[in-house]
Amino acid sequence: MLKTINLHKKYNDFIALESLNLEVNKGEIFALLGQNGAGKSTTINMLLGLIKPTSGDAFINDISVTENPQEIKKHLAYIPETVLLYPNLTGIENLDFFSKIAGFTYDKEELVSFLNRTGLQEIAHHKPLGGYSKGMRQKVGIAIALAKDAKVLLLDEPTSGLDPIATADFTELVCQFGREGRTVFMATHDIFNAVSVATNIGIMKQGQLIQNLPSKTFTAEELQEIYLKTI
Ligand code: ATP
């Protein structure tokens, strides 16, 4: 579903990402850990087609990102650390607008049901997004991903700044996404969340993927130990 072949990014002489070979299959949730500057966002931006690789390529559903940057957008949803939607539009208006941009028109009931699935309280649906908390904005972001029927979800530090309940809600939504056979790739610093949500965990150091491990084989404490030894 998501694959990179020798994906490589250089800025002058600096290697931001070194020949990344990775496969994340349908229904898998891949969490990428690594220190600041390790190359996590560079990877996500290349998967999105926002940064052109120096060499190599990424594939979403077997479609080349470099050759078909517009086509792959139909299969992807991206939720950055801070979800930027239209602050003057309500949650439901944002969902309606971004669904239409992606080519989907839903009636009000359907829009409400997408928002309900994310756990966004109904009272918030008709309030301007400018007054939403970070966790609420993320829920609208997930509702947009569901409405677009995105097969692949890319998340950049999704739990940073969320309180423990919002993190738990978010974790449950990401797990549901995986159970529906969708694929999730997330960059995170949250070791505890990575262990609870991911099927596979990668650890990146200075642009290199040093570890790629199935997550169910260890606890958060054990992962922290592996992480500290790796970086
Ligand atoms: P963080 O956890 O802080 O978000 P990250 O793992 O996402 O870090 P990246 O943002 O991918 O790290 O950056 C990887 C490296 O590439 C960093 O050393 C960064 O300074 C460098 N880099 C990123 N963009 C550019 C650019 N446009 N020009 C030069 N160097 C860049």
Image: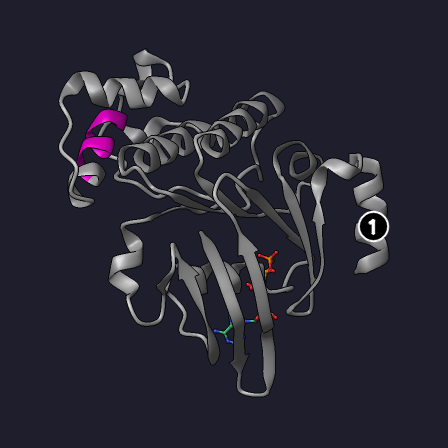
| Residue 126 is at least partly visible in this image | no
Taking 163 as reference, is 192 above or below it? below
* Amino acid type at image mark 1: Ile
* 221 vs 217, nearest the viewer: 217
* 34 vs 182, nearest the viewer: 182
- Seen at 57% across and 36% down, the residue is 161
Q: Quadrant of residue 199?
A: top right
The image position of residue 132, as x and y in percent, is: 38, 27
| Residue 62 is at least partly visible in this image | yes
Badge 1 density bin: few <14, some 14–19, many ≥20, Cα 10 Å: some
Whether disc 1's CB lies below 8 Å from ligand 1 is answered: no
The image position of residue 207, as x and y in percent, is: 64, 69
Left or right: residue 30 versus residue 71 is: right
The image position of residue 32, as x and y in percent, is: 62, 51
What SS does tag 1 mark?
Answer: helix
* 85 vs 107, nearest the viewer: 107
Q: Quadrant of the C terminus?
A: bottom right
Quadrant of ligand 1 in image: bottom right
The secondary structure that most of the magenta stretch takes on is: helix
Residue position for label 1: 226
- Seen at 48% across and 80% down, the residue is 55
How many numbered marks does the figure carry?
Answer: 1
Q: Which residues are magenta?
A: 91-97
